Amino acid sequence: MSDTDRSEVATEPKPPFELGTGPGRVLVWFYGVFTVAAASRTIVEMARGFDRAPLAYSLSAVAAVVYGFITYSLVRGGEKARRAALVCCAAELLGVLVVGAWTLAEPAAFPDATVWSDFGMGYLFIPVILPVTGMIWLRRAKTVTV
């Protein structure tokens, strides 16, 4: 029996590509850890004295929200979540670059460090590496689903 004689041709659609599988699972882990780290840091800093460095603490809170949203999007999966996570990764990278440059150019504006200070040096530069890695993974995920 040849392939043309078979009546049961595989017409089932491919299962959707899950963002949180394979290397995406490592991203979910890192983003989850950074969500907890940034949120915990923000809560402690704000409780100890928000008036000491409100800009730095607010930026750490923004970082926590961005990390949390990306974590949620990677776990949720699907095309809409992939696109949303891609936009958030780009915004995160922009934030890290702007805040990193700002903290170097005008250190007096930041009496205390943020998660993104000095391009994430306090976190082994993972805050600048993570969004780039995330965008690469999310772009790959699109090519697999098409």
Image (cartoon, rainbow, N blue to C red):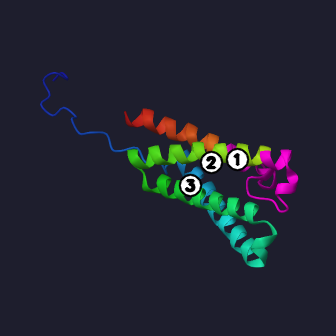
Magenta portion: prevailing SS class: helix
Circle 1/circle 2 CB separation < 8 Å: yes
Residue span colored magenta: 102-129
- The residue positioned 72% from the left and 73% from the top of the image is 46
* Residue found at the very far right of the displayed protein: 108
Q: Position of residue 38 (x, y in %)?
A: 68, 63
Residue 146 is covered by the magenta coloring: no
* Nearer-N-terminus badge (3/2): 3
Q: Is residue 32 left or right of residue 109?
A: left
Tell me if label 3 and label 2 are in contact, CB under 8 Å.
no
Res. 28 mark: 3
**Mark sitting earlier along the chain (1/3):** 3
Give the Cα distance between marks 3 and 2: 15 Å
Mark 3 closeness class: few <14, some 14–19, many ≥20 residues within 10 Å: many
Quarter containing the C terminus: top left
Callout 1 crowding tier (Cα within 10 Å): few <14, some 14–19, many ≥20: many
**Mark 2 highlights which residue?**
92
**Amino acid type of the residue that numbered disc 1 sits on in the rendered structure:** Val
- Residue placed at 85% from the left, 46% from the top? 104
Residue carrying label 1: 96
For label 2, the SS is helix
Residue 86 x, y percent position in the rendering: 52, 43
Relative to 114, is 106 on the left or the right? right
Q: CA distance from mark 1 to mark 3?
A: 19 Å
Expressed as whole percent of the image width and height from the top left, the position of residue 9 reads: 19, 32
Q: Are marks 1 and 3 in contact (CB under 8 Å)?
A: no
